[in-house]
């Protein structure tokens, strides 16, 4: 079956979604990221892998954290970086997505990191660029956020070594979360035997079980004996109408506090893609605890994004 992410040699040409990637491709990215992790600990945090290349961050939707980590990753690879917040520039003047991209291509950019509020936007752009130009999806609607899925997989591997005996719980706004979808695909591809989703019915997509997950409506039952707890942000900006009674009620019913963390395995890790809503989906005591790996996730994210860009540019085959 045709995979728009691969070139005719079967190498990664774009990163558009986790879905469609082989286990070997994901492991290649994780292994490459491992080799880049030490660069962040050096006095001089640079390698010349993308010297002479231009990486353009094209964000049709705001995200300071994701854009910043992509920028740091590109600069550590010695690329030239252009940041374009399209939400406040050409789009507001009526320019189309393709016109914006074509103008940037005319400036000889090599890699485009694209975030857009519409699902499928990165695929659409990738289908209109030349083979020597690479597209990285930095989040499209509620569809996919592949580098977040990869950095979460990297984090789990870092603390749990392998995937084949784990129980992973993803808690919260599954319906509106592209992070949840990317993680579910990644964990299934990597061989995690049990992926649980925990949420109220109003925050679960129809037929979510078809993605290969176990559904729990009761957080206490869902967290029992899990190895990894992945909390999700409540995405009020993507909700149509009232899906929750109140933030206080949500925290009472689905928030992660110490008592609920104690239901998981003693060495369970707590993850969150950020930004966190303390007191809504997670208690500060838990977010700042020794079991929390939320800040290491950010550090690992830079190495993972470096790995993706290096592989796309053909420097790590």
Image (cartoon, helix red, strand yellow):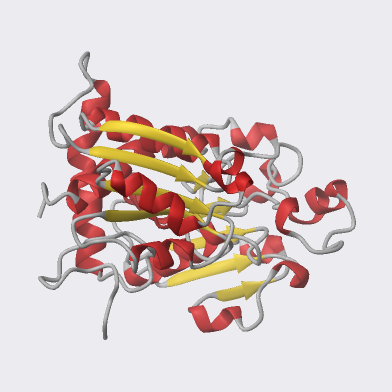
Is 205 rendered above or below residue 291? below
Quadrant of the snapshot with the C terminus: bottom left
Q: Quadrant of residue 56?
A: top left
Vertical order, 101 against 16 (above or below): above
Quarter that holds the N terminus: bottom left
Q: Nearer the viewer, residue 193 or 135?
A: 135
Image side of residue 141 versus residue 129, left or right? right
Along the line of sight, the residue nearer the viewer: 113 or 289: 113
Work out whether residue 93 or residue 204 is closer to the camera in this orientation and state it. Answer: 93
Image location (x, y in percent) of residue 310: 19, 45
95, above or below 210, in the image: above
Residue projecting furthest to the top: 43
In the drawing, does residue 253 fall left or right of residue 39? right
Location of residue 222 in the rendering, given as x and y in whole percent from the top left corner: 63, 65
Which residue occupies 44% across, 54% down?
99
At horizontal 30% and vertical 46% (from top left) the residue drawn is: 106
Left or right: residue 57 versus residue 314 is right
Q: Where does residue 53 sit, x and y in percent of width and height?
A: 20, 38
The one nearer the camera, 15 or 162, is: 15
- Judged left or right of residue 228, residue 175 is right
Residue at 29 percent across and 72 percent down: it is 4
Q: Residue furthest right?
A: 245
**Number of numbered discs overlaid on the protein picture:** 0
Residue 301 is situated, as x and y percent measured from the top left of the image, at: 38, 41
For residue 209, which quarter of the picture? bottom right
Q: Would residue 155 be visible to someone looking at this image? A: no
């Amino acid at each position: 079956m045709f995979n728009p992410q691969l070139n005719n040699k079967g190498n990664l040409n774009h990163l558009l979604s986790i879905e469609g990637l082989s286990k070997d491709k994901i492991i290649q990215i994780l292994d490459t990221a491992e080799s880049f992790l030490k660069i962040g600990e050096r006095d001089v945090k640079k390698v010349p892998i993308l010297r002479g290349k231009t990486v353009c961050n094209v964000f049709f939707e705001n995200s300071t954290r994701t854009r910043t980590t992509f920028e740091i990753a590109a600069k550590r690879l010695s690329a030239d970086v252009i940041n374009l917040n399209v939400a406040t520039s050409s789009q507001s003047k009526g320019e189309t997505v393709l016109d914006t991209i074509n103008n940037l291509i005319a400036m000889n950019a090599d890699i485009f990191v694209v975030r857009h509020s519409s699902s499928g936007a990165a695929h659409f752009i990738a289908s209109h660029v030349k083979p020597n130009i690479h597209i990285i999806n930095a989040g499209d609607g509620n569809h996919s956020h592949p580098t977040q899925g990869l950095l979460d997989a990297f984090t789990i591997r870092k603390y749990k070594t392998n995937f084949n005996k784990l129980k992973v719980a993803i808690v919260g706004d599954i319906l509106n979360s592209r992070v949840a979808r990317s993680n579910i695909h990644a964990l299934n591809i990597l061989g995690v035997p049990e992926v649980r989703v925990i949420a109220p019915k109003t925050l679960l997509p129809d037929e979510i079980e078809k993605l290969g997950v176990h559904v729990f409506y009761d957080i206490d039952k869902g967290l029992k004996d899990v190895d990894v707890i992945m909390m999700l942000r409540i995405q009020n900006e993507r909700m149509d109408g009232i899906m929750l009674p109140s933030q206080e009620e949500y925290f009472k019913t689905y928030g992660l506090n110490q008592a609920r963390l104690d239901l998981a395995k003693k060495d369970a890790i707590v993850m969150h893609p950020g930004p966190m809503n303390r007191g809504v989906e997670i208690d500060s005591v838990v977010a700042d605890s020794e079991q929390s790996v939320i800040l290491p996730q950010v550090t690992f994210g830079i190495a993972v994004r470096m790995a993706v860009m290096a592989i796309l540019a053909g420097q790590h085959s």
